[in-house]
Amino acid sequence: MARLVLLAGMLALAGCAPAAPILTLPPLGAARPAGSADSVRYVIHISVDGLRPDAVERFDGAALPAFARLRREGAWTHNARTDADLRKTLPAHTDQITGRAALGPAGHGWTVNTDPAPGVTIHSNHGSYVASVFDVVHDAGRRTGAFVSKSKFSLVDLSYDADHGAPDTTGPDDGRDKIDTFVYASDTAELTDQLLADEAREPFAYAFLHLRDPDATGHWWGWSVRRGSHYLRAVQRADVQVGRVLALVDRDPRLRGRTVVIVTSDHGGTGHSHYAERPRHFTVPFYVWGAGVAPSDLYADTPETRQDPGAENVGWDALRQPVRNGDAANLALALLGLPPVPGSTIGTQHPLRVSETPRSAP
């Protein structure tokens, strides 16, 4: 694994298209016309830490152009949910990469929200191997990358490195190291610089980008959504980085028409924290934008299996689940034409689906 640690400086403090069919699992075939649902070769998964959906709604499109574009051109909801039981950064992101809840017999079991103790992995804590989206993409012979802005994500690096990743039993042996490139930088502009440079050299089939700005500011200054607040300025900084990723997809002919970007968050917040049983804490956005994705409402895309939860924190036992940030792992794999994460439970029986942009007539 190429691991690059950037010891960065301190952080600078919908309507559904009615005729659109549902995007289905594409095979990794040969003829894949750019821009269609079966053209997807790359997924970039962005988690904006601590992002409250109503913070996005406070701005007009000119102030948050990237988030405005995601809503204008993508499938999205501002009423997705984080883990039903925990609203902590590291457990919630473990949901996002494993497709599992934190608790319960089938959960990933990670509940700690600090830098892990030396040698501790997701697997050693769980008692058995916990597969991830990185496993599935890597074992299919494709490149993966993780670009993170908090040191506690060393848990992910260690859990899926050459010593702790599972043997590859899928096709040719691509080794146990599931993350080809792991980058840590606390400055999210520098972190995004590195992602863009690496994507320009050779695109990742799956890349994960974590942007800490709203969360770091929320803990220090509070999750105020008043005009001009420190928190809203942090949301604007995150928008800049998301916009840079969208711009890369636009300008790189290898990515354009073949890439989907998934953007979500791990939790919201009020005051200076995000651990309570409050809608502002467990409500998160979820956006899907890119090749073959029609502008739509994610709940309208899958009405038979997903239900808008209103203001409720719906439990894992509900028959119709809300859209959850933990859907990101298996949605990314479905878009890439790959099977779900082994052992995952989020979005397996009832996959999250997005409407497909109707193809132009030849």
Image: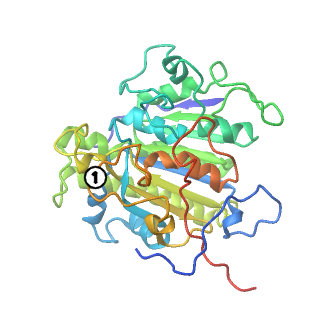
Q: Is residue 75 above or below residue 236?
A: below
Residue found 41% across the figure and 43% down from its top: 316
In this view, which residue lies farthest toward the bottom?
Answer: 361
Which residue is at the front of the view, 94 or 225? 94
Left or right of 343: which side holds 280?
Answer: left
Which percent across, then down, holds residue 145? 60, 40
Q: Which residue is mark 1?
A: 312
Left or right of 58: which side holds 107?
Answer: right
Question: Splitting the image into 4 quarters, where does residue 22 fall?
Answer: bottom right
Which percent across, then down, holds residue 221? 18, 42
Label 1 Cα crowd, 10 Å radius (few <14 / some 14-19 / many 20+): some
- Give the structural element (helix, strand or loop) at label 1: loop
Colour pattern of the rendering: rainbow
Left or right of 156: which side holds 1?
Answer: right
The amino acid on which the numbered mark 1 sits, given as a three-letter code, is Glu
Question: Splitting the image into 4 quarters, where does residue 354 fall?
Answer: bottom right
Left or right of 139: which side holds 259?
Answer: left
Q: Is residue 254 above or below residue 47?
A: below
Which percent across, then down, holds residue 319? 44, 51
Which residue is at the front of the view, 167 or 114? 167
